[in-house]
Amino acid sequence: MMSSMYQGYASAAFGLEGLVAAELRKYGYAQVRSENGGVRFEADMTGIFRLNLLSRFSDRIYLLMADVSCRTFEELYQAVLKVDWETFFPENGAVNIACKCVRSTLMSPRDCQSVAKKAVLNRLRERAGLRVFPESGAPLPVQLSLRNDRLMILLNTSGDALSRRGYRTWNGEAPLRETLAAALVDLSPWKPGMPLHDPCCGTGTLLIEAALMAAGRAPGIYRSFAMERWKDMDSKGLQALRQAESEKEQPEAVLNISGSDLDPEALKLAERHLRQARLPQHAVSLSCQPLQELHLDAEDGVFICNPPYGERLSDQKNCRKLYRDLHELRKRHPSWKLCAISSDPAFERSYGGRADKKRRLYNGRLECVFYMYD
C-alpha cells in the first residue's frame, strides 16, 4: 500500500490553487494539474503523508478514488461500491461521509450520504464475510463532491483542516485562517531575513506563519493526520519521515519579524500562540502601540496586515480612516513596501492610491483583495 501510486487531490481556497500547484512542483510531485478548488497530482502513500506535513496553503489532502458522471442514485451507489474501501478501512472503522452538491441532478446531500454509506458498508461486509460491519473504531472520512453531474469520491487523508497547525487556541475578533496567512506572506515581496512588521497583528497568525516559513518548519509537524489510523499503514516509516522533516528546521533563521496592536488582550494571546507554536522567545517581537505612532528604524522592510474591514456600516468610517493611516505609515517608511487584505471595495480610495498589484482571495466566505504597494 505504501509504495502503490495514487491520484491525489489537494483542496484549496479560491485563489490559492496556483500557490498549491507551485508548492507541489517545488516538492517534486508528479502530474500536477490545478483546477477550480484544488490541485491533482500523483504520489505514493509516503508522498501523501509528506505533503500533509509540508503543505502551507492547501486545506486538505485527499485520495481521489473516482471521478465519474453521476445523475442517478443507482449510478452513485455503483460508483461508491467499486472503490476498494477494504484496503484502507481498519476492521472496525466507522464510515463518515460528507457531501456537497452543486448544479447537479442529485441535490440532496443527506440522500447522497445515505446511498453512499450503504454502498461502502455492503462492500466492507462482503469482503470481510460479516453480516454487520461493527463501525466501532476511528472514522474514515469520505468526501463526495457532485458538481455539474460529475462525481468525485475523495478519501480525506488529513482529517482536520491543515490550517489547524495546533498553535492557535483563540481566534480573536478578526480570525485569519493559517493557510491564508501563509499565502499572504508568500504573495508579498517579503523574503526571510528582511524586516517584516504587522501593524494590526491581533493574535499573531501572520507573524507566526512568517516565522515558520523563515525557520523552514513543516507546518504539520506537530499534529496527527487521519491516514495514520488506516489499515496496514507503516507507522514506523511515517514517524521516521516526520522526524526527518523536523530535523530540517532552523529556528535561528527567524530574524527581524515584529508586530504591534492597540489591544493588549490580543497581544497576550499572540504571545501565547508564539509559545504554543514552539518558536524561540527572540523569534517575534511584539509591542502595544497605535499604528499612527509607529516608527521603525529598519530599512527595506515589508508591512503585511489584515486590518478591520468595516463590514458593519457603523464601523466603516473608522476602518477607512485606518486605511488612510496605513498610507501615512508607509510615507513615514519610504523604503518599505505595504500589503493589506480587505473586503472593502473602497480600500484604494480610502488609502489614497492605487495598488501596484492586486490578488483576489477569500477570507472564509468573504471575497477580498490583497493590495500590494511597492
Image (spheres, grey):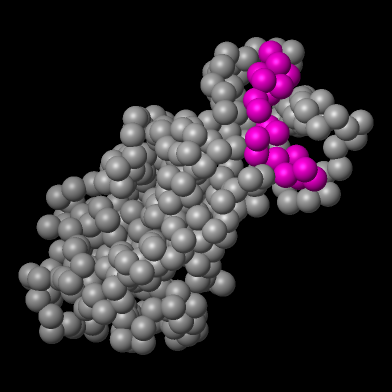
Q: Tell me which residue sits at (24%, 60%) in the image.
A: 339
Q: Tell me which residue sits at (54%, 21%) in the image.
A: 67
- Answer left or right for 172 relative to 306: right
Say if residue 111 shows up in the picture.
no
Q: Is 61 situated above or below 107?
A: below
Q: Quadrant of the C terminus?
A: bottom left
Q: Give, as a single range, the part of the protein colored magenta.
A: 75-96
- State the residue in front, 70 or 293: 70
- Residue 295 in percent (x, y) is at 18, 83
On whether residue 241 falls in the magenta region, the answer is: no
- State the residue in front, 21 or 29: 29
Q: Is 346 situated above or below 62?
A: below
Q: Tell me which residue sits at (72%, 44%) in the image.
A: 90
- Answer left or right for 318 relative to 190: right
Q: Tell me which residue sits at (68%, 23%) in the image.
A: 80
- State the residue in front, 49 or 109: 49
Which residue reaches farthest right? 131
Q: Is 17 situated above or below 170?
A: above
On whether residue 82 falls in the magenta region, the answer is: yes
- Residue 208 in percent (x, y) is at 37, 71
Q: Which image quadrant is residue 235 in?
A: bottom right
- Answer left or right for 67 relative to 351: right
